[in-house]
Image (spheres, grey):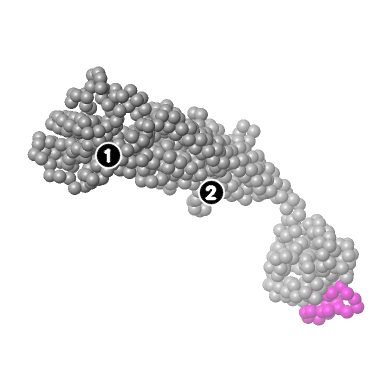
Amino acid sequence: MTVTQGISTPVYPEHLLETIQQQLTLSCRLSIHCLENPSEENVPIHETCGTAQHEPPCEEGCRRRLHEAVFRAIEEQKPAVFRCPEGILNFAAPFWDERNRICCILGAGIRENSPAEPSANPVERFREADSSKDATGLEDGDLQPSADLEEVESAAETVQEILLSVLKKNPYAQTLEKSTGQLRTLTDVTAEIEQCRDSEQVSALIAEFLVVLFNLSAVIVLLVDETGADFFVKKALGQAPEEFNQGAIRKVLNENPPGRVVPIDDARSLFPGERKRPALCLSLVDGERHLGLLALFGGSFLARDQLLIELLTGRAAAKLGRLAWEDQSRIEKGRQERLVEMICTLSLVKTRQELFRQTVDLAADLLRASRGSLMLVDVTGENLVMVAARGMSESLAKNMTVRIGTSIAGRVANNGTPLLVANIEKDRRIATSNRPRFKTKSFLSVPLALRDKTIGVLNLADKEGENPFNQTDLDLLMTFAKHVASMTERAEIFENADQMEELAMTDPLTGIYNRRFLERRLDEELSRSSRHKLEFTVILLDLDHFKRYNDLVGHLGGDRALQKSAELLLHSARDMDIVTRFGGEEFCIVLPATSKRESIFVADRIRRAIENEPFPQEKNLPSENLTVSIGVATFPKDGDTAEVLLQSADRALYHAKETGRNRIVLSEPPTSVKFGRQLG
């Protein structure tokens, strides 16, 4: 056979090596070489044998033994197995390519299970010089396939058989058939990716597909967290590393084209603790948004394999991007709906203190914060006073005062500008150490403004999961704060109106309700009792000989007696009863859902309370103490309107006065039920 000097590569090395790798059970490092002039100088040293020794005497020994094995294989037309000076098993399997050139499949890097005693040679010097390397020249922990000599010989024969089988067929047709099959599989997988409902399913699907299709030892999918700053393991298959270097991974993603395969010869820089095995890394990118990283371990990839992986990764990243957008939209929609619910809840609150408490609680729930506070500008306009807090002692919160212009909240109140801080120690606007009582270094502080005037500050801290607050959180809290400011003014108006109404409905001397309130309350009770077919009772009472008592003690003494009597009525009545001043020394009590018989016990308790209570100079009265006469009328028997009912109670009261005072008279004639002493 005529040959020319030089080394060349056959037309279809990728297909040939791929076919052998798929059918060979023994793990080893394969390469293919074509020798146009097979001389010792042109036989290449196998660069992938796995040994770290590539200098004399290793190179010299390898070249000689490799040359002998290759030419023995060519001459005998069958595989030849040999050991290199490092004791590593290798083999050469000859074949002739389509241009009738002599070629060899070289398999190497196999550690012998029971290695022969190494002959004395200069390599020993290298072993002694580097004690961290074993007899193969590999560093501790490096991967190295191992087998018996017989297994290597059997593998070499298998390679020879594969060569004979493959070379009988059209290699291009086989390559096309395989590529078509892979593309068909890719189409099916991408269609399945489109059906995935969440990132968990997408990650699991691509990891499983890659492990099976390329016979990988491990696949790991890292995704960015909600902050967009850090990665977390979403899916791991096989012997995946447990640790990863956040900074190194970000550097790889930033320095390489998005979505392209990045070969990593030593993955330990990205995954500390990882054994020395090569990896392929690809960034998961949707548009300009980095979603994560895909890392593949233990595979041997051809150029078209890498293109296939890039296509799959691109489809997966696009789906992950859509899912992330849908999740974010769902979260934002949920937040907006929750915001509307909260505003509706606050709109029903009429007291300021309840509004303040709910404002802090709802704001903290909205942004998942465990701490929060609401501070309002005091009447002087110079200080902020804490009116509600979450995650703080109530007694401490009540005494918290901040001068406007000082501290964080004071500065926000002073300039009216919201403050979003991700890290209090690194933010130049703050630049201070984190406060001891806070778990995280991030917080939000927004002003409450009403007609361009700051009326307070709303603060949140310690977000759930110890994540920093972001711009979305700030925007949502600002919207919430605008509504709170207007509701604060509204609650103040309501409170003032309630206070004015309370004053209008309250007797200024005794502090109990007045006749105006009684009339309104009687109308309500008449309507309710008519609707539900209930009874209710009215008690009308008058202090006996009060005009004479007033002359004895004077007007101020008389006023004190009326005040004391009102207190006794409130104490003797039930919580459900309505106690009012009817006029002068007369009082009226409404007993809801109470029959006439049940009302007798309340009325007598009141009569005895007045009788037994000491009053100044009461010994000078005809009865020698201050007493009360009581008339009782019940709806509907004694009247079905407020006017008729009061008239019935008044007649009963008059009868009690006429029959001796200090007694109770029921309004149903002709029988009078009397309690107490008979007085003439």
Residue 389: numbered disc = 2
Front residue of 185/353: it is: 185
The answer to whether residue 602 is above or below residue 66 is below
42 on left or right of 544: left
* Residue reaching furthest to the bottom: 678
Q: Amino acid at mark 1?
A: Ala
Q: Secondary structure at mark 1?
A: helix
| Residue 122 shows in this picture | yes
Which mark identifies residue 64?
none
Q: Quadrant of residue 510?
A: bottom right
Residue type (three-letter) at the residue carrying disc 2: Ala
> Which quadrant: the N terminus?
top left
Name above or below for residue 57 compared with residue 210. above
Q: Is residue 642 magenta?
A: no
Question: In this view of the protein, which residue sits in the foreground, 446 or 426?
Answer: 426
Q: Nearer the viewer, residue 413 or 271?
A: 271
> CA–CA distance between discs 2 and 1?
78 Å
Rendering coords of residue 25 (x, y %): 33, 43
- Sequence-wise, which precedes: disc 2 or disc 1? 1
Specify whether 570 is left or right of 467: right
Question: What is the quadrant of residue 493 in the picture?
Answer: top right
Residue at mark 1: 156
Going 85% across and 68% down the picture, which residue do you hit?
635
Q: In the image, which residues are magenta?
A: 657-680
Residue 341: where, in percent of width, then height? 65, 46
Mark 2, secondary structure of its residue? strand
